[in-house]
Amino acid sequence: MAVVYNFSAGPGVLPEPVLREVQAEFLSYKQGVSIVEMSHRSDTFGTIVEQLETRLRRLMHIPDDYAVLFLQGGATLQFSMVPMNLRETGRFAYLDSGIWSKKAIADAKHFGDVIVAGSSAASNYGTIPDWPEHIQDVDYLHVTLNNTIEGTRYTKLPDTDVPLVADVSSNILAEAIDVQRYGLLYAGAQKNIGPAGLTLVIIRRDLITERDLPSYLAYSKHVDTLLNTPSTFSLYVAERVLAWVETEGGVEEMERRNEKKSKLLYDALDTSPLFYALVSGKNRSLTNIPFTTGDDATDEAFRQFAETRGLIELGGHRSVGGLRASLYNAMPLEGVTRLIDVMHEFEQEGQDVSYKNV
């Protein structure tokens, strides 16, 4: 069977060794039952959660004055939980750099006044907004560090006098993040950590206060405990993925590989007579690379052309169209070189009528 390379933006590709390990353990995990049948209150499962947090702290250098919460609801639920839990003055600052930050802004408006401190909407989010020179009298400043749909990212952070909150769903563990620069980080797990169903929140403990909120929506109810039955399978696989990351050399090695993979693809796009990247300059994403031929029909013809050659999920997000390759940690270098080869093949043959009607 031909090798299939999955370029999905999420749920994303997982390391093959982890999938094989999960397969081998699925029917019986230590206690003679499947991991999906095991009580989340059992000692065996408790060890999985402890190891997951320990590995995450080690990989990201998370200090003890930060709590790690294992939640559900994806990053989308955090669009509401962040303003609910960090609300003091009821004024929140946001950098509007893409579709996900736009959604976060819309949800935050339910809980206070949102100040858009910078926006790249006028460029159709082809760039990222500059940091505000001064930001004060707000409860926090929110930024989406990597824009999964638009393919842009922030690489430098200014000093701020207010807590910095970041959505790191698509770049967590893919590049180094200085946790201590932030008050709170959150991420859906389904890109670089594990299956869908798990959400990570890393929050400075002094920002956790008791709030008059429904229990699940209060960060304080999740500190150092599992409030309710979590996505047990997602937690288990995430622990195995983090073990794989450690074995492979940690976040530093993941970042090195991702830089190499993305440079190969960007270089191919920049020299292609047919394809081109939608983002240029220093703010190109390491993990999500949108590109196009400039013609919707040709884009779709290439997507189908690539799929017949084992390259799947290359379609752009439904809101923008085009093409997109997501190069998460588990995407091997061979997948990128295969994509480039197929692009060259399409450039040479794909304009023939037989391929326009794929």
Image (cartoon, rainbow, N blue to C red):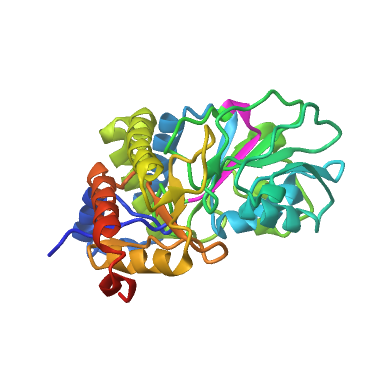
Tell me the residue at 47%/52% (across/down).
290
Tell me the residue at 43%/57% (across/down).
293
Q: Is residue 29 visible?
A: no
Q: For residue 323, what is the image quadrant?
A: bottom left
Percent of width and height locating residue 250: 34, 31
- Relative to residue 47, is residue 110 drawn left or right? right
Percent of width and height locating residue 117: 78, 39
Name the one closer to the observer, 278 or 193.
Answer: 278
Name the one closer to the observer, 24 or 182.
Answer: 182
Q: Is residue 186 magenta?
A: yes
- Relative to residue 134, is residue 273 drawn left or right? left
Looking at the figure, which quarter contains the N terminus?
Answer: bottom left
**Residue farthest left in this picture:** 1
**For residue 202, above or below residue 316:** above
Q: Is residue 256 visible?
A: yes
Percent of width and height locating residue 291: 45, 52
**Residue farthest bottom in this picture:** 357
Q: Which residues are magenta?
A: 180-188
Name the one closer to the observer, 232 or 131.
Answer: 131
